[in-house]
Amino acid sequence: MTAQRALVRRTALSVTAGAAALVLAACGSDSGSGGHDMGSMESDSSPTATASAKAGDHNDADVDFSKEMIQHHRQAVDMAELAADRASSQEVKELATKVKGAQDPEIKTMSGWLTSWGEDVPEEMSGAMDHDMSSAMPGMMSGKDMDKLEKASGAEFDTMFLTMMVEHHEGAVEMAETEKADGKYGPATKLADAVVTAQTAEIKQMNKMLGKS
């Protein structure tokens, strides 16, 4: 009887120890699994939060500025290319080269922003009708204005080009000031500030060339 009770007792202890080991293993497994899940959630949520922050880095003012300034710059480049062929003054030719050299890269930059935001890049304007459709923007020349400029030559062209480009630059400065006030995207507001600085200086230069200052 004593030996039998001892055997039963050892068996019971073994079962109890085994059960305890299973419980501990289960707890350890749950804890490990829970920790992994939490880490996964944190890891998964961080990129999402970052992406959301990036998506919210721009606003409608940035989009409008980029789309409109692309069209505005394109017309300035068209005018500058005309000046490279038709201007009689070397100073006018040099100014036109400077305008084209500054605004072509800015067009590419703003086009890249729009693409990254999932926005359409404005199509190239072609013909007087398209110029007229865009003439509502400050400083934009109408199709008739562009036709006159294309037909002019010599000193007449120089005066017409400078007069139009002063108005064009003034419109760009106005648009850039709006972006500085209302925009949210840092690179866009910085570009707007650069436009204000550069084109204000060119306005003074052109007015001087026209004998107005």
Image: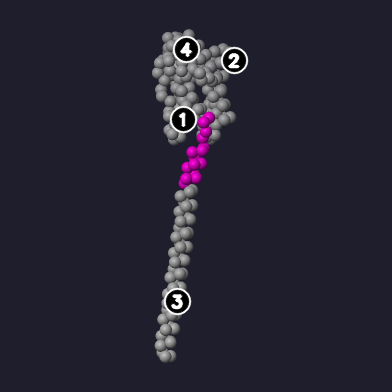
Quadrant holding the N terminus: bottom left
Instruction: State how far apart marks 1 and 4 are (Cα).
Output: 26 Å
Quadrant holding the C terminus: top right
Query: Which residue has dot 2 on it?
Result: 213
The residue lying at 46 percent from left, 50 percent from top is 44
Marking on residue 145? 4
Instruction: State how far apart marks 2 and 3 are (Cα).
Output: 102 Å
Which of the two discs, 4 and 2, labels the residue nearer the N terminus? 4
What secondary structure is the magenta-colored segment mainly? helix
In magenta, the rendered stretch is 47-61
Disc 1 marks which amino acid?
Met
Which of the two discs, 1 and 3, labels the residue nearer the N terminus? 3
Closer to us: mark 1 or mark 2? Answer: 1
Disc 2 marks which amino acid?
Ser
Label 2 residue SS? loop
User: What percent of the width, then of the height, locates residue 184?
Assistant: 54, 34
User: What percent of the width, then of the height, locates residue 41?
Assistant: 47, 52
Instruction: State how far apart marks 1 and 2 are (Cα).
Output: 33 Å
The front one of 77 and 59 is: 59
Label 1 residue SS? helix
Query: Which residue has dot 3 on it?
Result: 16
Which of the two discs, 1 and 4, labels the residue nearer the N terminus? 1
Label 4 residue SS? helix
Q: What is the count of numbered marks?
A: 4
Query: Which residue has dot 1 on it?
Result: 110
Label 3 residue SS? helix
